[in-house]
Each structure stands twice: as C-alpha cells, then as structure tokens.
Image: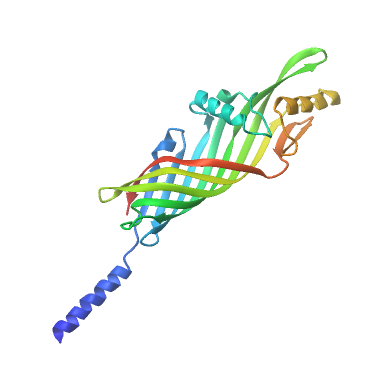
Amino acid sequence: MKITSLTLFYVCFSILCFAQEPRPSVVKVNLSSLALGVYSVQYEKVLGERISFALGVGYRPVKRIPFAKTVERYIDAADKRIDYISLENVKKSESTVGMLHITPELRFYLGKRASAPIGTYIAVFGQYNSFFGKAPVFVDMLYRGVMARVELPVDTQIKTYTGGLMLGKQFRLGNRFTFDWFILGGHYGKVTIHGESKQDLEGYDEQFITDLRDKIIDTFKINEQYLSIDVDKQGVRVENARNLKFLNLRGFGFNIGYKF
C-alpha cells in the first residue's frame, strides 16, 4: 500500500510539473539588417508544441542611405512600375532616411518531429513601417525669360500597413542559442505618403506659384488621381488623394537568438 501510494504520488507530481513547465522564449538580433544600419530585435514565445507568437521591432536613425548607388539602381528600376509619381529628379545619394517597423507574427512549425521553436515554419504576420527623412529634389523652369533650377529639400514620411506570409527555419545552436533564417515571404497592404517643403515664396507673384505647381506635376509625372499637390507662398505639400496599394517581399534575414 505504501509503495502504491508513493508511486501514485510521483506520477501526480510528474504530471503537475509537466503541466506547469514554462514554455521557452527566444530573444533574437537580426544580423542582416545591421548592414543597412537598422537595429532590429525579435521576441518569440512558444505557445504550444507547434505554435509560437513573435514580435519584432526595428529602428534606424535618420542618416544617409547605405549603398547609395545600389539603392539608386533599385529605385530607378522600381520607378518604371509606379504609375503615380516619378523619382527621377530626386537626389537619391544625398537623401537621408530613418525608419521604424513593428512586426507581430504567428508561427506554425511544420513536420512530424516539429517542436517549437526549432524547425521549419510558416509565419502569418502583419507589419507597420514608417520611413522618414529628407529628399532633395529639383525642377528646371523658366522665370522672367531665364531658365532657373529650383531646389526643394522635401521632408518625407511614408507609412505602410500590410499583412502576409513567410517561410522560415530556426536551427538549434547548442542548448541555448538558435539561428533563425527568414527565407522568403510577401506582404500586401496600403501606403500613405506625405511630403512637405517649407519655402518662403512671398517674393514671387501668383503666376510663378501656378507655373511652379504645373512644372512639379510635369517633372515628377504626378497623377492627381492618386496624389494631391498644393503650392502656395509657404511652400509645397504632396500627400495621398486616395488609398495606395503596397506590395513587397520579406525574407533573407539572419537572426541569432538566445533561448531561455
């Protein structure tokens, strides 16, 4: 009887301990984003055998664009597919940009032997991005019979709100460390755009203000069905006239994590 009671005690104790065993968590640093000057971390909490929740946050202070020539080629290629504005007259190598992103995601680990947080997973995620900085732009226009170049330093803010799917895989590195590879995914949503150049144009007549607005629309190929533009004695403002769609890729991220 004593042996039976003792056995039952140990069985109940083991079940109780197992039920109260805390689920592991992982804190990660994104190494690939550091190359772009973005400080990005993620916290992942295991919720069950094959499921976890992760929250990522990234920040980049306002500064010059890294790999400016490569980025400029990418923007020029993307520019051809944007039908509401052209970025040809933007001085991209002189532009500055900062950013903040927040990415919550729910991960589902795949395979017969899957055990979160290790293995291949599909992530369902949402993402908020805010890009902010200054972009020098220029227009060439005729003023009182003389061709003049008007340079406008534009304070910009672009925000995106998207959702999507991503494939990834997390590897075990010893007992405590992990390597999390964001392989590839896509996300889709909307984007808001606001650009403002505060200029003192009090010394110019109304005809110049009208001509400047027309020249900006023509130079930057602004489609007023999508973007509204306002030019007055205080400067120039551009922002959404309607909802704009945003499609982008997510992936190629390499993260080192600590599991506890």
Residue occupying image coordinates x 54% and y 36%: 98
Query: Is residue 221 depicted above or below 228 in this figure?
Result: above
**x%, y% of residue 11?**
23, 76
Query: Is residue 200 depicted above or below 225 in this figure?
Result: above
* Residue at the outermost right position: 206
* Residue at the outermost front position: 112
Q: Quadrant of the C terminus?
A: bottom left
Residue occupying image coordinates x 62% and y 38%: 157
Residue 61 placement, left or right of 149 = left
Q: Is residue 205 visible?
A: no
**x%, y% of residue 116?**
35, 56
Looking at the image, what colour scheme do you see? Answer: rainbow
Using the rendered view, name the quadrant where residue 203 is placed.
top right
Q: Nearer the viewer, residue 41 or 245?
A: 245
Using the rendered view, name the quadrant where residue 228 is placed.
top right
**x%, y% of residue 187?**
53, 46
Q: Is residue 180 visible?
A: yes
